[in-house]
Image: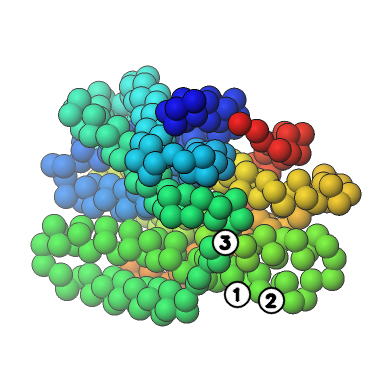
Amino acid sequence: MTTLRLAWLFARRGATDRSTILLPIIAFAVVTALLLIVAGGAQTFLSDPLYLALAVIALALLVVPLIALGGSAARLSARRRDDRLAGLRLLGATTATVAALTVIESTVLAVAGALVGVVLALVTAPLVGLIPFRGEPLGMSVLLAPGWIALAVAGVGVLAALSAVVGLRQVVLSPLGVRTRQDAPRMHWLRAVIAVAVVAAVYAAMSALGALDGMAIIIAVLGAGFGGTIAVLNLVGPWALRLLATRQARRARTPRRLLAARTVLESPKAAWRQVSGVAMTSFMAVFAGVGVALLGSVGDADPETLQLATDVRTGVLITVIASFLMVACSAGVNQAAAILDRRDLYVSLDRLGMPVSEMNAARGRAVLSPLRITTVGSALVAGVVVFPLAGLSLLIAPASIAVIVGCLAAGFALVWLALLATRPVLTRVLAEPSPSL
């Protein structure tokens, strides 16, 4: 039997696991649809500097989480494939064969999801066009040109291919390393230093925003500041979770608590991906709360100011809804990926007699415990960044607090629902403990 024949059989075997196919496709579809809708809405404001600045802020708040969600979807599509590719290497498959199989399979799933996302964007475009801004509906101007749509689909495919290549290094260099998970995660304290430095720089830039000359420069500073802050949250998040889990592992008094802490310590990056969606939402919730409080302070203003306030409210609502869609999708994708990542562990615990309910309880604690820390931390960072623009009075206004608390509660609920929705994945994993060729 030739190596290519073996590769085809391995790919066919992996295709039987619906969770590793449907979830990535859904995630890529959501990523593409949101990206096209948000970018299409932003292009309608190119002639208005003020509205363009607000659109850039929304894009900066959403682009980083969208990229992270796309990466998570690509990693999920590779979970069950790792063992199959490691087996191919042990059977003598060449590096080129393994690389081609990995990249092609990941890219096909990503492009399929992206095409579904394009259809979703086109179908919802008439509805999005009904959203009023500047006193009139956006109309069909929210549709991007075919070239930009094709570029978005290609970008999603490239993202999946790059994620596959990065994950491929373990298979190519050490086939057995994939099965034994030999690579230990490394989290350096320099992550925290870089994060503090970036947040301090953004705070200084926001404080000096009034002294800048030129709308283009102001827009660039706003976009870079908000986008950069969200990026460093993704940088420092895994490090913070590792510290938290280390402390919890030392103080654990029950198997559930110990298993939850060790789950985080096994891969802080994977643990962060499971809660990063809500962390990003808590960051956005601060801006939403400030926007709502600002609208409440408008009072009896001139028609132009009232129109701007109404449009800001609409933009805040759209951004929050988009972030919650990402949270829901990201939570499901990352929860399924976490189960597949720890498949051998769960099978071993099942053989030792641990009830499935106890495993699910440990899974919940491994997610919800870090979630409380990351959401509060992200909200505090957002408060620091927005303080020079809004001031303390808007940050602690009742309307701001209500919106922030409401958004955080909704984020927690979505993650909890994702935990419930992925319980069948764990059940299927335990039902088939030993995958075969």
Residue placed under numbered mark 1 in the picture: 243
Task: Give the mark toward the camera: 2 or 3.
Answer: 3
- Neighbor class of circle 3 (other Cα within 10 Å; few <14, some 14-19, many 20+) is few
Residue 210, numbered circle? none
Check disc 3 and give the amino acid type.
Gln
Q: Quadrant of the C terminus?
A: top right
Q: Judge whether 312 appears above or below 434 on screen.
A: below
Of 382 and 246, nearer the camera is 246
Residue 247, numbered circle? 2
- Which element type, helix, strand or loop, lies under badge 3? loop
Of 195 and 8, nearer the camera is 8
- Neighbor class of circle 2 (other Cα within 10 Å; few <14, some 14-19, many 20+) is few
Mark 3 vs 1, N-terminal side: 3
Of 222 and 350, nearer the camera is 350
Task: Give the mark toward the camera: 3 or 1.
Answer: 3
Residue 346 in sight here: yes
- Which element type, helix, strand or loop, lies under badge 1? helix
Residue 284 in sight here: no
- Point out residue 293 in the picture as x, y percentages from the top left corner: 45, 57
Could you tell me which residue is drawn at 22 percent across and 70 percent down? 209
Could you tell me which residue is drawn at 71 percent across and 38 percent down? 434
- Neighbor class of circle 1 (other Cα within 10 Å; few <14, some 14-19, many 20+) is some
Q: CA distance from mark 2 to mark 1?
A: 6 Å
In the image, is 160 to the left or to the right of 8? left
Could you tell me which residue is drawn at 53 percent across and 30 percent down? 10
Question: Which corner quadrant of the image does residue 95 belong to?
Answer: top left
Residue placed under numbered mark 3 in the picture: 182
**Marks 2 and 3 in Cβ contact (< 8 Å):** no
- Point out residue 221 in the picture as x, y percentages from the top left corner: 22, 64
